[in-house]
Image (spheres, grey):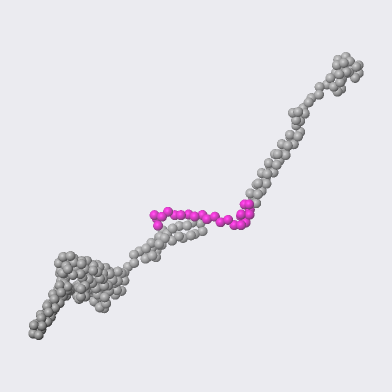
Amino acid sequence: MQGRRTGERLAYSLLVLLVVVVASLTIPTSVKSQFVPCEIVNLSVRHPDSVPAGQTLQVSVLITSSCDASVTYTLRVDLVDQRTGNVLSSVKMPYYPTAPGFIQPINNTATAPSTLGSWVLQDQVYIINNLNGQVAGSSQLQFVVNVIPYTPPPTTTTQMLISSNTTQLYAVNSTSNLMTQTSAQPTISLMPTYTTSEETSQSNATTLAEALVVLLIIAAVVFFAVMWRKREPSAGGQTQLMARYCTQCGNELRGEGSFCGKCGAKQ
């Protein structure tokens, strides 16, 4: 009985030892990573000194950090308006360090307020451990941007002014509302022609009259040519009859007989 109890205790001890060994082999990284911090070595911000009211502002953050290369992270940068406490822009991106030290740039954009003067902003940077969701490192940096009045760029609009006889192009400056003639642009003169129905009818009547005159001339020429041809004898009908006289008595012979009608002599 005592040997049996000793064997059970030994088996139970071996089971507990086996569970501890398996646990230490399967999750050593996750347990240890929970306590490894990620240090932000340097944080710098690039931004314009001034921005027009209502216009877009872009802020570039350059981060130098030292983290555990075996752990994956998420980098989050919040751009905060210090006057109101509102987060103007929040950007997240995966962080994959391949060495203990690495540099990562990230950009935030925001719209400038309508209030002129100094605009106090702050970049808040967080490096989050993806294994447990905890913040492994954080830093913040405050800076000032001057908000200036917004001046729209001048625009040139081309307008066409139509008069009764000419058309000219002028350039109009929308900021000064002064109209000046552009010397570089040539003057364009347009002479529009408008034809009324009365003028069209007169033109058609004139054309018809001219056509009738031409037809009459052609008809007259043809008529006189035909009449002239009728008055001229044809070539086949031009048989000229020669007068004949009797060789005996000198009597004029009529017709084409072979004997004289007066003396009866043969011709």
Residue 81 in the image: state x and y as whole percent.
25, 75
Residue 146 visible? no
Magenta residues, dominant SS class: loop
Task: Say above or below: 235 vs 7.
Answer: above
Relative horizontal placement of residue 224, taking residue 178 as reference (left or right): right
Foreground residue among 238 and 102: 102
Q: Residue lying farthest bottom? A: 1
Question: Which segment is the magenta one?
Answer: 182-204
Image point (68%, 44%), residue name:
215
**Quarter of the figure with the C terminus:** top right
Residue 229 seen in this snapshot: yes
Q: Position of residue 85 (x, y in %)?
A: 25, 78
Picture layout, residue 225 above or below residue 15: above
Query: Residue 122 sits in which quadrant?
Result: bottom left
- Residue drawn at (21%, 70%) of the image: 73
Image side of residue 256 versus residue 148, left or right: right
For this orientation, the residue located farthest to the top is 248
